[in-house]
Amino acid sequence: MPAVSPDKLYYRIGEVAALTSLRPSVLRFWETEFVLLQPRKSRSGQRLYSQENLVLIQDIKRLLYVEKLTIEGARKRLALPMGATQQEEPVAVIDDGSRDLLREIKTELERIRDIL
């Protein structure tokens, strides 16, 4: 895997594909299956993946390809708090309406940050 630059804030989908040895189509599909994986979009609509997104992608890849979990199983595992066992229930489940509201708030905060 090519080295990840600690100075770089965002990576385009082609760079992420090369870093993770995954096809861009797989990354786009995972965005539809894992709500935690939501890269920013540039003004031109290009996906911009953060360092946190890269870590999440590596986790998803490990769960699916190494641990051989289904997508549903990987979703459940990612929903668990760090260090929790599979028998424990997730701390909180956010409904779709709340998730959409949080995304809007995040987008607005990012817009304000960019202005500053």
Image (tube, rainbow, N blue to C red):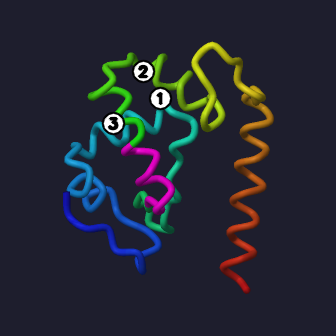
| Residue at 46%, 62% in the rendered image | 51
Q: Which residue is mark 2?
A: 71
Front one among 62 and 12: 62
Q: CA distance from mark 1 to mark 2?
A: 8 Å
Q: Report the residue that reaches farthest toward the bottom.
A: 116
Quote the CA–CA distance across marks 2 and 3. Answer: 10 Å
Left or right of 45 in this view: 15: left
What's the residue at 33%, 23% (across, down)? 67
In the rendered structure, which disc, 2 or 3, sits on the residue that comes first in sequence? 3
For disc 3, the marked residue is 61
Residue found at x 37% / y 41%: 28
Q: Quadrant of residue 3?
A: bottom left
Q: Do labels 1 and 2 touch, CB within 8 Å?
A: yes
Start-end of magenta stretch:
49-58
Real-space CA distance between mark 3 and mark 1, rounded to the nearest whole angstrom:
13 Å
Circle 1 Cα neighbour tier, 10 Å, few/some/many (<14 / 14–19 / ≥20): some
Which comes sooner in the sequence, label 1 or label 2? 1
